[in-house]
Image (spheres, helix red, strand yellow):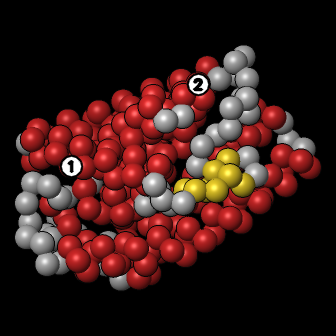
Amino acid sequence: MHIEPGLVDASKILLSYATATAAFAYTFKLARDNARERGLLSVSSRALISTALVLFYFQVLPHQPIGVSEVHLILGSTLFLLFGAAPAAIGLASGLLLQGLFFAPSDLPQYGMNVTTLLVPLFAIASVARRIIAPNTPYVELSYRQALALSTTYQANIVAWVAFWVFYGQGFSIATLTSVLSFSAAYMAVVILEPLVDLAVLAVAKAVSHNLFFEKRLHQGA
């Protein structure tokens, strides 16, 4: 899910700085609240693990340029379930930045767009989770339908943000619409696969005792 260089030119890219700043501000609020509840060490540890996983997802797992962007197996819902919203958001932002700094410098001008496209869907997952998961249900007890709802929320929001940046940068035309549709269709494979990964990871997590390296809700009700 990387916005291609040049898709949004310099005269329009200022908007991405504003959206990224808003996403960072909300991430800071979540992290501060979580640190008050669990302690700074817990939040920092989970964020560090998330960062390492995100870098692994981007650099090692298969990714394919399709249409206007690249299709990645980002596993945003997996990060959310294991580590919580704040550490997952920090991991996504930090992993994306490290990839740009050390492996793909051409992506750095698009960092604001890319980080917005990753973080806002994560916040949407947190909102959906509060509505569809009963307060007394630990995440390790999620059903396939619930995991699918979280994954679909994340991927659909990514596609929507990619489409927004494409049409914002290039205007609405048959060519841009075709590129967006091909990218969206390719992401359907991720929507199918990610809930299965989530359930497999949660099944393994059942055997792990609750500790500071995981989201408290993973093993306990709210």
Q: Where is residue 1 in the image (x, y as percent from the top left)?
A: 58, 49
Q: Which amino acid does label 2 sit on?
A: Pro
Q: In this view, does 6 lie above or below 116?
A: above
Question: Given contact means CB atoms under 8 Å apart, are the residues at marks 2 and 1 in contact?
Answer: no
Q: Which amino acid does label 1 sit on?
A: Arg
Q: Residue 46 carries which label?
A: 1
Q: Element at badge 1?
A: helix
Does the rendering let one see residue 35? yes
146 with respect to 191 (left or right): left
Query: Which residue is at a point 71% across and 66% down the rendered structure image?
Result: 185
Q: Where is residue 155 in the image (x, y as percent from the top left)?
A: 55, 60
Q: Which of 69 and 101 is in front in this view?
A: 101
Q: Which of marks 2 and 1 is nearer the N terminus?
A: 1
Q: Mark 2 points at which residue?
A: 109
The C terminus sits in image quarter: bottom left
Does the rendering let one see residue 124? no
Q: Element at badge 2?
A: helix
Query: Which residue is at a point 65% across and 23% down the rendered structure image?
Result: 13
Q: How crowded is mark 1: few (under 14 residues within 10 Å), some or many (20 or more)?
A: many
